[in-house]
Amino acid sequence: MSLPPAGYYPDPEDPSRRRYWDGARWTEERVDLGPVAPGPGPALVVAPDPWLWQSIVATILCCLPLGIPGIVYAARSSEAARRGDLAAARAAAGTARTFVLWSVGLGLLTLVGYALLFMVGVVAGL
Amino acid sequence: MGRPVAPLALAAAAGTATLVLSGPLGGRYAALTPGCPIRALTGFDCPGCGATRAVLALARGDVAAAFDHNLLVTLLLPVLVVVWVQWLLVTLGRRDAVWQPPPAVARTAAVVVAGWWVVRNLPGPFARLGAERMAADVPLVASLATLLLGGPG
């Protein structure tokens, strides 16, 4: 996949602004051009992070089955990115991210709850 | 140009914890931590059960014990190092240098992790793959049921 040429493109972090792409990577140079006119602009071909390794780590360390669909959606995201369907890739990566965050959140909640229970048990001498 | 604060801090914390816990203080740690809540509740090993013990075994240089505690995590540790380096690159603003694995890798990972979860909980020849079970490791659900319903003892 060849990278797009250098120039100002819609900032992936803030689509209302333009950001300078030096041909290989994003720079920190952003310009505020007001509302960017909709329509054919140079669409930037940068695939989103599919949240693959985060899903795997969450599955292994949070001990919750939620990480598995996270991995599956990460796979769908990178497949869509390979096809060039960046909208689908972004949507799937977002779903994978949701699964990871729920997995981590519920995992931490379980751990804190269990640690409290454990301490109560220690104090009560069980 | 970003500053790689988070990856370096996490690596330092993980390194310090590993050094401390694999040393003479490690024994106390085992008595102080409640362990994996999911395993205590259900009695089943999750994919990560035994991971801490595996890492501490590696820190002591005992590779065989590391594989015994958690085969998958021990095998994945080099991958984790690669992921960490990529995270470092992203924080340095080198997103372009990050390698995204092909979709087949992700598909395989889903099957491997799910399969690992099932297989290590199977009896018989697969029991070796489970995290080492301790004698007092009775599922919490069973203990609570005994407590509430008044079981034997």
Image (cartoon, rainbow, N blue to C red):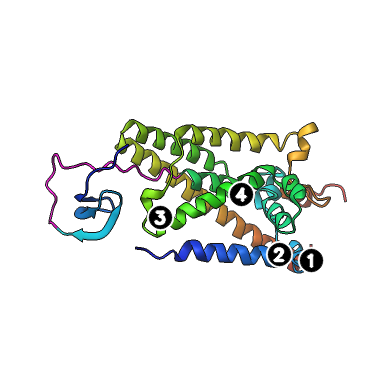
Q: CA distance from mark 4 to mark 2?
A: 18 Å
* Label 2: how many Cα within 10 Å (few below 14, some 14–19, many 20+): many
Which quadrant of the structure image shows residue B19?
Answer: bottom right
Give the residue at mark 3.
B90
Give the residue at mark 1.
A125
Residue B79 screen position, x and y as percent: 56, 46
Subunit of label 1: A
In the image, is B104 to the left or to the right of B144?
left
B5 up-or-down from A60: above or below: below
Disc 1 and disc 2 on one polypeptide chain? no
Residue drawn at the location 79% of the way across and 62% of the way down: A126
Dot 1 and dot 2 residues touching (CB under 8 Å): no
Which quadrant of the structure image shows residue A56?
Answer: top right
Disc 1 and disc 3 on one polypeptide chain? no
Residue drawn at the location 71% of the way across and 38% of the way down: B120
**Number of the front mark, 1 or 2:** 2
* Label 3: how many Cα within 10 Å (few below 14, some 14–19, many 20+): some
Q: Amino acid at mark 4?
A: Leu
Dot 3 and dot 2 residues touching (CB under 8 Å): no
Whether residue A48 appears in magenta in the rendering, the answer is yes
Give the residue at mark 2.
B21
Q: CA distance from mark 1 to mark 3?
A: 49 Å
Q: CA distance from mark 1 to mark 2?
A: 26 Å
Inspect this view and state whether residue A63 appears: no
Q: CA distance from mark 4 to mark 1?
A: 38 Å
Chief SS of the magenta region: loop
Q: Secondary structure at mark 2?
A: helix
Viewer-side residue, B72 vs A64: B72
The segment highlighted magenta reads A33-51
Give the residue at mark 4.
B77
**Number of the front mark, 1 or 3:** 3
